[in-house]
């Protein structure tokens, strides 16, 4: 081997910054804590990223498919054509659809914006000037499971990260003691496809949604076994962390192992933080009435909405609440009678949702919290079966947004005269997701993850921000 020249042997060392040292040491493992801190304080954002208008999202998911033409999008032509034959060639999920059917509800304009709201939503009508309606959303499937996955993950099939997981990955956790992504579902059961709707997909598992219960132990298996003190548990976790770190040294760059280590530490901290977050004993009686906790019909969903407010106050990035569980009439899936179905679910959700928006506003949280409402699709304008129900309609349905930089009182897009197809400014699921990310300061085209040789993103290869509803 040739000897180096003296000038080479004695050349001064190149200065190394602390960040360079962390990036080079241990195959890059030394930089992981630094990168996590950068995500938490936003330092990792690109210079050309949109300025964040919101810090958190509360998604009110009406599982089963609420009917826009019976709640927010009146159709005088449908009223006039009640009982007439539907257009030819309409593709429906079930095949027992009959003639066109007018809405059983009365519509009135409300607020300074004059937005239409149907009679089952009187409380929501009082805050309508804070809502922005998008009445031309469409999705890829008329079947619940793929439509749910499409709305939640951007793809109508399993295996992809949910919106909350993408936000957790992109922004990191604001709270060290609570998960970044929390899910609460209906007392009647969870939605079809279950945990796939809030799973992390191919992202590190630390970003998956954590189901939270509204009573008792908020998270299953969180409490330590009887007789195990917190000091003993801390010692166990430190030993476990030491063993895991030793294993990690033998298997560098293994994200699932790193996620497992973090999950143990988070679970330990959550044992104190999670029960406090759902403890409503210090909420005033007036606040409880605002959310409907004083009435049986609204108590369950109202409790979830109040907990959602408490969670975003404590730094949780993404909270998703499901209204409706199980199947058909237990959810918003109104095959066996539109009116009895929507009477029930509107009564359960009206006061709590209005209370949430009003409470966020008076606490100064609405400007930094994006509230999203909608289901996996809408309902057909025809009657189904003998009970005047409605079948699934993915071709044109409604969502609304509030807070987080949204222009209250706005309305964007339209369906046709009978509410069947989105015809004016159609909005895709990709557009919905692009808008949510944009309001949290993320360019949806830049938030990507390398998986199986391809960079994936929540919006796939499409998506435009819904600019007309932004403040």
Image (cartoon, grey):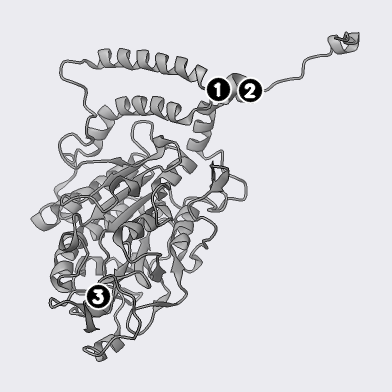
Give the image quarter of residue 8.
Answer: top right
Instruction: Return the residue at label 3.
Output: 95
Q: Is residue 157 left or right of residue 235?
A: right
Q: Residue at x 38, y 50 (%)?
A: 158
Q: Earlier in the sequence, mark 2 or mark 1?
A: 2
Q: Give the x, y percent position of residue 456.
A: 53, 48
Mark 1 crowdedness (10 Å alpha carbons): few <14, some 14-19, many ≥20? some
**Would you name the residue on which mark 1 appears?**
30
In the image, 96 versus 61, the foreground residue is: 96
Q: Residue furthest left?
A: 296
Q: Secondary structure at mark 3?
A: loop
> Do callouts 1 and 3 mark residues in contact (Cβ within 8 Å)?
no
- Asked if the residues shown at circle 2 and circle 1 are in contact, with their CB atoms under 8 angstroms apart, the answer is yes
Give left or right: position of 117 versus 14: left
Asked where in the image residue 264 lies, by quadrant, the reply is top left
Q: Nearer the viewer, mark 1 or mark 3?
A: 3
**Percent position of residue 384, x then y:** 20, 76
Horizontal side, residue 426 vs residue 454: left or right: left
The CA distance from mark 2 to mark 3 is: 62 Å
Dot 2 crowding, Cα within 10 Å, few <14, some 14–19, many 20+: few
Going from the N terminus, do you reach mark 2 or mark 3 first?
2
Q: Earlier in the sequence, mark 1 or mark 3?
A: 1
Of the pair 113 and 188, the residue shown nearer to us = 188
């Amino acid at each position: 081997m040739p000897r180096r020249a003296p000038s080479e042997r004695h050349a001064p060392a190149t200065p190394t910054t602390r960040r360079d040292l962390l990036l080079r040491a241990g195959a890059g493992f030394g930089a992981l804590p630094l990168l996590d801190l950068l995500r938490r304080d936003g330092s990792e954002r690109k210079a050309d990223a949109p300025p964040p208008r919101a810090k958190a999202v509360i998604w009110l998911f009406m599982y089963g498919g609420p009917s826009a033409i019976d709640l927010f999008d009146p159709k005088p032509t449908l009223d006039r054509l009640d009982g007439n034959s539907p257009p030819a060639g309409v593709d429906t999920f079930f095949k027992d659809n009959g003639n066109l059917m007018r809405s059983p509800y009365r519509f009135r304009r409300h607020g300074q914006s004059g937005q239409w709201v149907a009679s089952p939503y009187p409380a929501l009508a009082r805050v309508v000037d804070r809502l922005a309606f998008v009445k031309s959303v469409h999705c890829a499937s008329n079947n619940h499971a793929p439509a749910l996955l499409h709305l939640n993950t951007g793809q109508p099939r399993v295996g992809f990260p949910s919106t909350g997981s993408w936000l957790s990955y992109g922004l990191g956790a604001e709270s060290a003691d609570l998960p970044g992504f929390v899910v609460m579902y209906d007392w009647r059961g969870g939605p079809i496809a279950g945990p796939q709707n809030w799973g992390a997909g191919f992202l590190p598992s630390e970003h998956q949604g954590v189901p939270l219960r509204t009573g008792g132990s908020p998270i299953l298996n969180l409490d330590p076994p009887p007789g195990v003190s917190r000091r003993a548990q801390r010692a166990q976790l430190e030993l476990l962390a030491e063993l895991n770190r030793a294993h990690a040294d033998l298997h560098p760059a293994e994200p699932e192992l790193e996620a497992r280590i973090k999950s143990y530490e988070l679970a330990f901290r959550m044992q104190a933080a999670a029960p406090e977050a759902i403890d409503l004993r210090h909420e005033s009686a007036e606040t409880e009435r605002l959310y409907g906790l004083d009435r049986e019909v609204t108590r369950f969903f109202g409790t979830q909405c109040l907990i959602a407010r408490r969670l975003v106050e404590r730094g949780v990035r993404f909270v998703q609440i499901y209204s409706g569980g199980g199947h058909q009439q237990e959810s918003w899936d109104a095959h066996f009678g539109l009116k009895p179905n929507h009477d029930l679910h509107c009564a359960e959700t009206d006061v709590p949702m209005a209370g949430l928006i009003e409470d966020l506003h008076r606490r100064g949280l609405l400007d930094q919290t994006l509230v999203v409402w909608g289901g996996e699709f809408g309902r057909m304008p025809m009657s189904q079966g003998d009970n005047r129900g409605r079948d699934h309609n993915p071709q044109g349905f409604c969502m609304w947004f509030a807070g987080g930089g949204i222009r209250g009182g706005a309305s964007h897009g339209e369906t046709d005269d009978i509410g069947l197809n989105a015809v004016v400014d159609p909005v895709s699921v990709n557009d919905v997701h692009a808008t949510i990310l944009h309001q949290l300061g993320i360019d949806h085209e830049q938030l990507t993850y390398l998986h199986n040789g391809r960079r994936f993103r929540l919006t796939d290869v499409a998506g435009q921000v819904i600019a007309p509803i932004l403040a």
